[in-house]
Image (cartoon, rainbow, N blue to C red):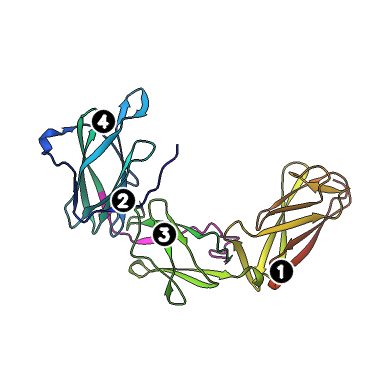
Amino acid sequence: MQHLRPALVILAATALCVSCTSEDEYTLSSRLSVWTHPTQVAAGAAFRTSVRVPAGPTNLDDEAFEVRRVSASPSHVARFEGALPQGRDVSHGVVVRTFEAGTATVDVAVETAEGERLRNVFDVQVVEVADAVFDDPCAVDGNPAPTRILDASAPIELDFQARDASGRIVGGLGGAFFSITQDDEPVRSEVDLGFGSIRLYPEQAGQIEVRAERFGVDHRVGLVEPGDVDRIEVVQRGGLEGTFVLAPQLYAGDALTCRQGDTHTISATITTPQVCQFWVAEEGEARFEREAHDAFDIWAIGSGECSVTFEFAPGAGGSGVRQSFTVDLAGE
């Protein structure tokens, strides 16, 4: 199922009121389905609630409807901020901004295409964030923040968990408590506490700092140009029966790097095709290219030395970086 992601419509009032009617004209009904993720939202962020009207208990379709009224209270805890237009899946999104810890009560009223007026009232817990723990998808062998290779076509993605004082995960959209800079200048970014992710859009190499002073977070990410990569180290791992894995790792000086996007590739050439070949390549294919930092599965088809040469063409200022690696398959 596809979900549209249209621009958020920001409304100045704390409640949406279209063709206003009194509460008595709406029926409190669980048939007006509301779904908020997560159940705990960070103060100072926002949350989005999906609003739907299922056609029936055994009918997977949804009825078309219009959101007529939304309110969030008390105002010092949360306020209604905006509504997302109806998507292809006949659902609406309601966005509420949070301010401080407490219980936010959200009241949503809709009118279906058949003229039925439904209402649902629900609570969301708003809590203070006490910590943010990063789980860097580029972490390798205990290195929490390896250096990225700059790729203007793709953002840097960081995963994290925001937690309250008791260690429970807290979600939400945005998060003004993060300061993201490079050389003391702001970096364009998107923060989604609900999915625990930060997307960074840097324009140059250098160190990026992700800080949240209110709870002591200081996470740093290095960024280098592709031409700064000056060597390749190869790590051998076990694979399926009759195969093994060679994982080339790119270094810029002493810094182990991580692919930021999928633009940069690394090639591998087998110079001993009578001894080994690529597992997923066509039979006899001696050269194979994959996205940088992806591993290569090698199939042992004979005995002797299996030799593979790896190349990262943009490295060494554009002249390319190469590294040969040999595996002794004698007796296998």
Residues at circles 3 and 1 in contact by the CB criterion of under 8 Å: no
Does dot 2 land on a helix, a strand or a loop?
strand
Residue 252: in sight, yes or no? no
Mark toward the start of the polypeptide (4 vs 3): 4
Residues at circles 1 and 4 in contact by the CB criterion of under 8 Å: no
Q: Would residue 128 be counted in the magenta stretch?
A: yes
Q: Which residue is mark 3?
A: 190
Q: In 3D space, how far apart are the residues under numbered discs 1 and 2 (Cα atoms)? A: 45 Å
Q: Which residue is mark 4?
A: 113
Mark toward the start of the polypeptide (3 vs 1): 3
Q: Which mark is residue 231?
A: 1
In the displayed structure, 54 sits above or below 94; it is above
Where residue 292 appears, x then y in whole percent?
66, 58
**Kind of residue at disc 1:** Arg
Does dot 3 land on a helix, a strand or a loop?
strand
Q: Residues within 10 Å of mark 2 (few under 14, many from 20)?
A: many
Looking at the image, is mark 4 or mark 3 nearer the viewer? 4
Left or right of 39, for residue 331 = right
Q: Would residue 109 be counted in the magenta stretch?
A: no
**Kind of residue at disc 3:** Glu
* Quarter that holds the C terminus: top right
